[in-house]
Image (cartoon, coloured by chain):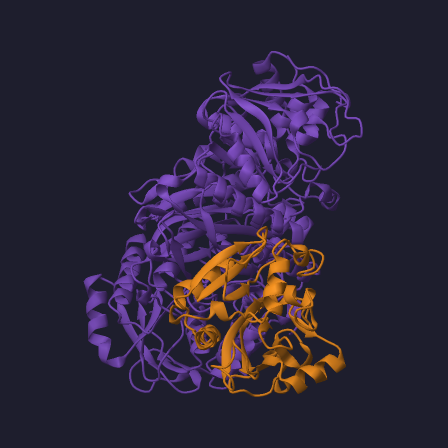
Amino acid sequence: MTQPFPGDRPVDAALAREFGLSEGEWAHAIDVLGRAPSYTEAGVLSVMWSEHCSYKSSRAHLGRLPTTGPQVVQGPGENAGAVDIGDGFCAVFKMESHNHPSYIEPYQGAATGVGGILRDVFTMGARPVASLNSLRFGRPDHPKTPHLLRGVVSGIGGYGNCIGVPTVGGELSFDPSYDGNILVNAFTVGVAKTDDLFFGRADGVGNPVIYVGARTGRDGIHGATMASAEFGAETESKLPTVQVGDPFMEKLLLEGCLEIFARGCLAGVQDMGAAGLTSSSVEMADRSGNGLELDLDAIPRRARALTPYEMLLSESQERMLMVAKAGREHEVFEVCERWDLDAAIVGRVTDSGRFVCKATPGYDPLAAAPGPRAPVVVVDLPVALLTKEAPKYERPERAATAAHGRTPARDVSGSPVVRAGSAPSGDPTTGLSAALVGMVGSPNLGSRRWVWRQFDHIVQVGTVIRPGDSDAAVIRVFCEEPGAGPAATKVKHLALSVDCNGRHVQLDPYVGAAMAVAECTRNVACAGARPLALTDCLNFGSPEIPETMWRLARAIDGLGAACRALDTPVVSGNVSLYNETDGRPILPTPTVAVVGQLARPDDRLYLAFATEGATIALLGAPGAGKLGGSEYYVQTHGEVGGEPQSLDLDAERALQDAVIALAQAGLLQSAHDVSDGGLAVCLAESCISGGRGARVTLPGLGVEATLAGQLFGEDPSRIVISFAADRREEVARVAKAHGVPLTVLGEVGGDALELRAAGTGEAPVVARVPVATLRDAHARALEPIVGAG
Amino acid sequence: MKIAVLRFPGSNADWDALHAARDVLGADAAYVFHKDTHLDGADAVIVPGGYAYGDYLRPGAIARFSPIVPALVAFAEAGGPVLGICNGFQILTELGVLPGALTRNAHLRFECRDIHVRVEARGPFTDVARGTVLRLPVAHADGRYQCAAETLRELEARGQIALRYCGPQGEPAESDPWLDPNGSVGHIAGVYNRAGNVLGLMPHPERAAEAALGNDDGLTLFRSLRRHLGAAS
């Protein structure tokens, strides 16, 4: 039985409401406990039952995702997932959202997002080797966008650059639906020896629980609850729920943890992320089927007079909870001393199945006279009530039209693409030529160099393909055999990509989500790698809106279908709901990140056109030239719309197999997938990257396709490749063997990109733009937001 | 040839330096922890990049109180070759082993990209590459070299300016603001101490020392060191 603690607020239905617990949830808690929860218990229930921790709205659907396969070492449910990369090593990875904190305080929100995902990976015993990020901001001319973009980018850099994990890629786009609710999704991959993975378990009754790392303060209290509510007018007042990051402390924690792990003195470990000490304790106890008892008087702290409620709910960063093997605690303390880390025994594993916390009223170790210790029980809850038996909802769903929740159309008469028109033109300042320049130079399609310049993308000397040079980042990782010396180290090559286009998901959540998986795996294949597995971050609006819930469910089905067809099981992930402000939801954004592996480093592919005279061809069916969901449609109509794309997953699989086979046969000079901006933008990017022009004839698409559709339609399952002219027959043979259409489009050469209409003989020029003009527009795409220089 | 790579708690390019010295150059290279007090008979020392003690106050400001520092300073004063890369350069200027200081980049942002430098000075790390232009990556927020006008004149007169930012063909950095990543005085990317045995530089030669990364221009600094030590022993 718990006892009241000085400072406790009255516990009643009003408090429950304030803590984000529904009436039914509150009644259920009282019913199970046979009493009203204490104030501290109410706080614990509130964070553990928050959407963020409990997945209460999405859990019923997540089970439909494929999570197994011969390559899977660890699927969802741990701190991160893991896939086999050979020789007894695995890649450990996960992606997580930090959307709400980043909107409130962009630098710290984004920085602690990076810190959190890094901890998830090294908690598993893996040394982090690379990070990616997926960022969404509101319209480029929204008054808050420059501040948010600058803050988020420098926050990601500030954390990752300091700790020394390279940020090797990512994606960034702008849409008015994110005006009041930006997205910051952070991904990290690490490498570990499979037999030496660590898990978040509180095994071994009687084992000591050890707190390691930064001291506890009052920062981030109720962060998980904040992340589980929509934004409104009072959002700015939520500043105290944002945590502050200390990447140097995290570096100490990383090195200290890896040394502790190597000693084999731990039974389990988990980082204190969302819901801090509470969720780490409870989840570890739950996985082991044990109980856990904490002595809160022993918690290392940096603030005076912390209450049990504050200690349990604080989201102070850079903290770990370890369960040591009894009798080997001193080994943990030895390493912590070497790395100047605070460490304290704060509890023990029990067989009670209950989460019990004790604290002494009035006791403050930071006080000159801390006072005598006489702990009382402040929390005594069944672990299962907080985990397996937490509320789970099958929320009502209602089919949504593409227009539901859509941001109202904006006036686009000033858009350079609209002004340019859609008529053929060989003059780069008019018609489709000018439209192409406008597209290539738009914030959604232009160069991201301003972003990645601020990320150390080369630390750890592993970055083989740097940001912007290929559809995926390629890193080499050093797999060291413990104690075997450098000669035994194996070098492996991974390809990484992150993707989602919420506009296509808005039009058709099933197809759009499947397209995200298809594009992300295609990116990895276009770097010459075989996709292995995937992690996701499902960013949606309020699950209490039936249309949003329907979209979430449909998107999960689309993800699942694509993952099955493309053999990329989901090994980890995160759900972020309530991404809406004043009732306006974001575009549904099920972001996915894929890890692939190259058989040999020489298989790697770049997107640049590399030699004069090389043949350019389209791999995959030319598509229907539909503009639905495209950047061009938005730029010309001012809103997301048009007929949804369709996706043939078997054709997608064959396409990816074909490009991997071509890469492994050494036949290609470049590969670049056709995605945002369509075929014309894809060709322009390969021209810009290679500093070479191209003479191209558009593939015939049938009578309905407009010229704009042929240039800028975003039909999936297409890759532009280039190869030496004398390899054409070999390339055609590989394509045919995979049943994939191959259409020769033209050749690399000259100093302009020249596009001709489909047809025989000297078809008319549709657009012709000097590469220098394209390059300049592309390079300056973000200048209207962040300025030059 | 024995090379010590110092390891401060926040060093993060320590592996990069060890890998270049040990696995690429083939030297007998090993870490020396910041809590150690001797260099284990090293023939040369690398002070690697990173954020030695978090660098929240000022890069390198706390590192100079580190237990390993007296041994490092003694080694440098005795004429031993020392290479300070990025944060290592910042630490060596904080220690006064190298002249000048490194302040926040002129545009106030972290900058990571390839740049070019002209190798100007003689010395243990530059004799092989002297007179050439190298493509090297930078990755720093505080790399803007600053010194008093009188110090600059002395550096020029004594041939202590090891590297200057320039164009791919050696064009002077004045011709294009893009060429100098941080706005350094005299476009200085690296300097020697007066005795010529200690080199500090902001670019990362150890991250450009292998064909596998598409660039081995940086290896010339390590090969120069090997020749220097080979000739000495």
Residue A156: percent from left, percent from top: 59, 56
Instruction: From the viewer's perspective, tell me whether residue A39 is left or right of residue A613.
Output: right
Location of residue A598 with respect to B128 vertically, above or below: above
Location of residue B16 with respect to A122 vertically, above or below: below
Q: Residue at x 42, y 57 (%)?
A: A496
Q: Nearer the viewer, residue A117 or A258?
A: A258
Task: For residue A629, say whether it is visible.
Answer: no
Residue A430: percent from left, percent from top: 53, 82
Q: Nearer the viewer, residue B99 or B143?
A: B99
Q: Which chain is orange?
A: B
Q: Residue at x 62, y 87 (%)?
A: B175
Task: For residue A195, say whether it is visible.
Answer: yes
Residue B16: percent from left, percent from top: 48, 62
Residue B10: percent from left, percent from top: 59, 54
Q: Which chain is purple?
A: A
Q: Quadrant of residue B141?
A: bottom right
Position of the C terminus of chain A, as image quadrant, is: bottom right
